Image (cartoon, grey):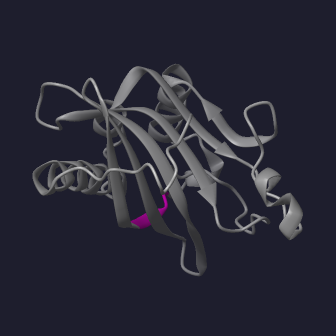
Amino acid sequence: MTTTTARTRTPVGAPVQHEIEQFLYLEAELLDDQRFDEWLELFADDTHYWLPTRMTRTVRERDIEVCGPDGAAFFDDDKAFLAGRVRRLASGRSWSEEPPSRTRRLITNIRATDLGDGCFEVRANFHVLRSRSERHHDTFFGERTDLLRRVSGAAGFQVARRRIVLDTTTLLAPSLSVFL
C-alpha cells in the first residue's frame, strides 16, 4: 500500500473525520464484544490484511526496519483467510482462544486523507489488551494504515487494505490469535 508523506497530506474535514472515527470505534466494539461475523462484514471482498515483521535496525537502515511485501509477516491474509480464522474462533477448537480472550482496544491519533473516488487513507495508533484465564495478559501497541472505501450501509465504509506495524520487534505473547 502506498502512503502519502506528511508534506502532501491533506486532512479530511471534520464531518468525514467524525464518520471515519465512528467506523473505527464500531470495529473495535465488534471485536471486543466477540461479534466476529459482523466484524468480517466491515472488510471488502478484495481486502488485504497484513502484519509484516519488524527488526531492529541502525539509523541508516530504518527504511528497511519493517519487512516489505515479499518479506516475512505474521499475517498476510485475504478475506477468505480472515473468514477461516473467524470460523475457527467460533468452533471452540482454537486452543489459543479456549477459553476466549477478553480484549479491549483503544484507537487513537486517527489521521485521514481523502484519496478521491470515495477512498481514504487512514492512519491510527492502537493499544490492544488481551486477558486470558486468570493471570495471562498481553499488550500490543502499534500503528495501522487502512485504505477505507465509502459504501452504502450502516457502517459507511469497508476496509480494503490494512497494514499493521507493531511497535515491538519481539512478540512475547504465546500466540497472536486476536485481530489488530
**Residue ID at (44%, 42%):** 146
The percent position of residue 179, horizontal first and vertical second, equals 50, 49
Picture quadrant of residue 136:
bottom right
* Residue that appears at 70% across and 66% down: 173
- Say if 98 sits above or below 137 in the image: above
* Residue 180 seen from this side: no
* Closer-to-camera residue (13/95): 13
Q: Nearer the viewer, residue 158 or 145?
A: 145
The magenta segment is 100-104
Residue 167 image-quadrant placement:
bottom right
> Where is residue 32 drawn, in percent x and y?
35, 58
- Whether residue 64 is visible to the viewer of this picture, yes or no, is yes
The number of numbered badges drawn on the structure is 0
User: Which image quarter holds the N terminus?
Assistant: top right
Single out the residue that lies furthest toward the bottom.
135
Q: Is residue 111 magenta?
A: no
